[in-house]
Amino acid sequence: MERTRFVLKGDIAYSLDPTTIRTVSDGYLVCLDGKSAGVFDALPEQYAALPLLDYTGRLILPGLVDLHVHAPQYTYRALGMDLELLEWLETNTFPEERRFADLDYAARSYGKFVDDLVHSPNTRACIFATCHTDATLLLMDLLDQSGLVTMVGRVNMDRNCSDIIREESADFSLSETRRWVENAHFAHSTPIFTPRFVPTCSDEVLAGLGRLQRETGLPVQSHLSENFGEIAWVKELCPWSAFYGDVYDRFGLFGGEGCPTIMAHCVHSTPEETARMAQKGVFIAHCPQSNTNIASGIAPVRRYLDLGIPMGLGSDVAGGAILSIFRAMADAVQVSKLRWRLVDQGLKPLSAAEAFWLGTAGGGAFFGQVGSFAPGYELDAIVVDDSRLATVRPFTVEERLERCIYLSEDRDITAKFCQGRQLF
Ligand code: GUN
Ligand code: FE
């Protein structure tokens, strides 16, 4: 249902900044033309005539943002976690992604992924598809019809992977990328250039993507400094590079003016790589569950926050098993504590408020003014019925939010809005 001018009533919470959550108990969130006009204790007179959706007693929160997820890997999530990244890709990932050459398989698999994403707390996602152009367009069409706002990438991979999935040449990879971009005309699902990662992308493909990026101004996403074996391999493949991220940068795929970029993981980034990301405004997608499952390590998130590097959370399904970014928030807090305890006591663990900010406004910034209810922000909201979580004692709205991060399930989401459109 299109309903872009309305009022939501309920217990509202959103981040004002990385450490501060504003809560309004029994408050009003006003949506005008898909954007927030503000959150109020009492409904201002000028909005009194708008339709009121009454969610009294429920939590109203910004929709969550997944900055990194692999749609084709949804089929086998929670399997095959006994390997590290490079073996995991060859054993589990590439044989599955190969199936997306079959459009019927892609339609069934992506249909399930999109359906589950709609019913999750997430309203935005940056998504990797596969190297198959037509299946990627099919995924974008399904996402577009769902009303979610997404960026989706057709994956480039023309070297160093088994020939069941490797693209036949750099020319083919680039001409298919162009065909994909020329056909990706959807209202709510837009293309993002997606070189898989340096080991599987020839210099020719990276250079061609850099040219396409400058021509189109479209954003970029990839993987960076996730795993020790991967980092050593990049050094071997590109001995001329100063550090891993320098490879993307040499080809114009690493942030800066006119090139919005997300790099997933950054678990083992060197000080030089970190400084370059800060300088060029590269977004980091922190994926704590994946980093745990495939034993990549623990990213120094506190250091990135202190340096002001833009950052959000990623599920990284199927490195991660769970789509919900509530789960990524809890995992981010937990791994930050392990890092503080075991690795570096100079890096304070994350608070729940910081994890909430990362999963809403932090990642939302990649989409513009997204992830908050401050006036002018695009109105993405979820309504959470947390009555299932009640105990004999009362909780403040902020405490209820904190408990949702750890305890809520998709079935507790009773309504969802994206850019003011009600999805259910
Ligand atoms: N690096 C290259 N491809 C992948 C992938 O599919 N998942 C993860 N976690 N890392 C990658
Ligand atoms: Fe990934």
Image (cartoon, rainbow, N blue to C red):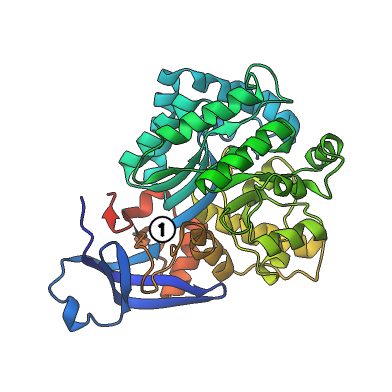
Looking at numbered disc 1 in the image, what kind of residue is underneath it? Gly
Residue 384 percent across, percent down from the top left? 36, 59
Q: Is residue 395 left or right of residue 54?
A: right
Residue 281 percent across, percent down from the top left? 63, 61
Q: Which residue is mark 1?
A: 63
Exactly how many numbered labels are in the figure? 1
| Residue at left offset 77%, top offset 54% | 269
Picture quadrant where residue 317 is located: top right
| Residue at left offset 65%, top offset 64% | 309
Whether residue 366 is situated above or below residue 107 in the rendered picture: below
Whether residue 293 is situated above or below residue 2 in the rendered picture: above
Element type where label 1 sits in the image? loop
Q: Nearer the viewer, residue 161 or 303?
A: 161
Q: Residue furthest left?
A: 49
| Residue at left offset 52%, top offset 43% | 192
Q: Is mark 1 within 8 Å of ligand 2?
A: no
Could you classify mark 1 by the number of other residues whose Cα lies within 10 Å: few (under 14), some (14-19), or many (20 or more)?
many
Q: Is residue 171 left or right of residue 389?
A: right
Q: Residue 301: tell me if it is visible.
A: no
Q: Is residue 93 left or right of residue 238?
A: left
Residue 355 percent across, percent down from the top left? 57, 64
| Residue at left offset 54%, top offset 42% | 69
Q: Nearer the viewer, residue 305 or 348?
A: 305
Q: Residue 257: tell me if it is visible.
A: yes
Q: Is residue 233 left or right of residue 421?
A: right
Picture quadrant where residue 302 is located: bottom right
Residue 315 percent across, percent down from the top left? 56, 47
Picture quadrant where residue 5 is located: bottom left
